[in-house]
Amino acid sequence: MTWTEGIINRQPRTEKIKWPESGLPYMARQHAREYGNWSKTFLTHNGSVPEDLEDEFKTLLKPRLKPCDGEIAREADLRYLPLARVVVPEHRHRVFYVYPGQTSLQVFTLPSPQRTWQIAATVLGVLTVLYLLSLLLS
């Protein structure tokens, strides 16, 4: 008698996809991550993708769900949050990010890129003046 035993173990490959990859400021992303009312869904290679996802993301996601050679199926846990970037002409130096929260819409405000550069230039100017003054006084 011959006793044969074996364990076949397959570790799944995990791939994180973030969409969009860039364009959303870090502070807005963190605020949305913490306070947003995220929708969750589980996808398989032959399941349907939720209709409220962007077409570009669907195009990015569908090829990754197709099984490769030797695979039976693929699946994905998806978490998504609709978010709008709003610029109001009366407040052109502010950018508003609006997304659904737990009980109501959440609005997160950041200075516009123009305003950020203006603030940085002002701070740099003040530091330069202080440096020059310190050189003159010493």
Image (cartoon, helix red, strand yellow):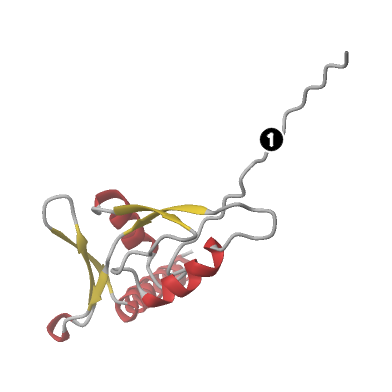
Identify the secondary structure beneath mark 1: loop
Q: Measured from the top left, where is residue 51 in percent x and y?
A: 30, 69
Q: Residue at x 23, y 53 (%)?
A: 37
What is the residue that sits farthest to the right in this orientation? 1
Looking at the image, residue 5 lies above or below residue 79: above
Q: Can you give x and y, in whole percent of width and height, for residue 57 in the image?
A: 42, 71
Judged left or right of residue 71, residue 108 is left
One can see residue 128 in this view:
no
Q: Quadrant of the N terminus?
A: top right
The residue pinned by badge 1 equals 9
Q: From the top left corner, tell me how far across and down residue 95 is, in percent.
A: 24, 74
| Position of residue 12 in the picture relative to residue 37 (left or right) | right
Q: Tell me the residue at 60%/59% (across/down).
A: 67
Horizontal arrangement in the rendering, residue 61 relative to residue 25 (left or right):
right
Q: Nearer the viewer, residue 29 or 68?
A: 68
Q: Nearer the viewer, residue 121 or 1?
A: 1
Tell me: residue 84, above or below residue 18: below
Mark 1: few/some/many CA within 10 Å (<14, 14-19, 20+): few
Q: Position of residue 115 (x, y in %)?
A: 29, 77
Q: How many labels does the image show?
A: 1
Q: What residue type is labelled 1?
A: Asn
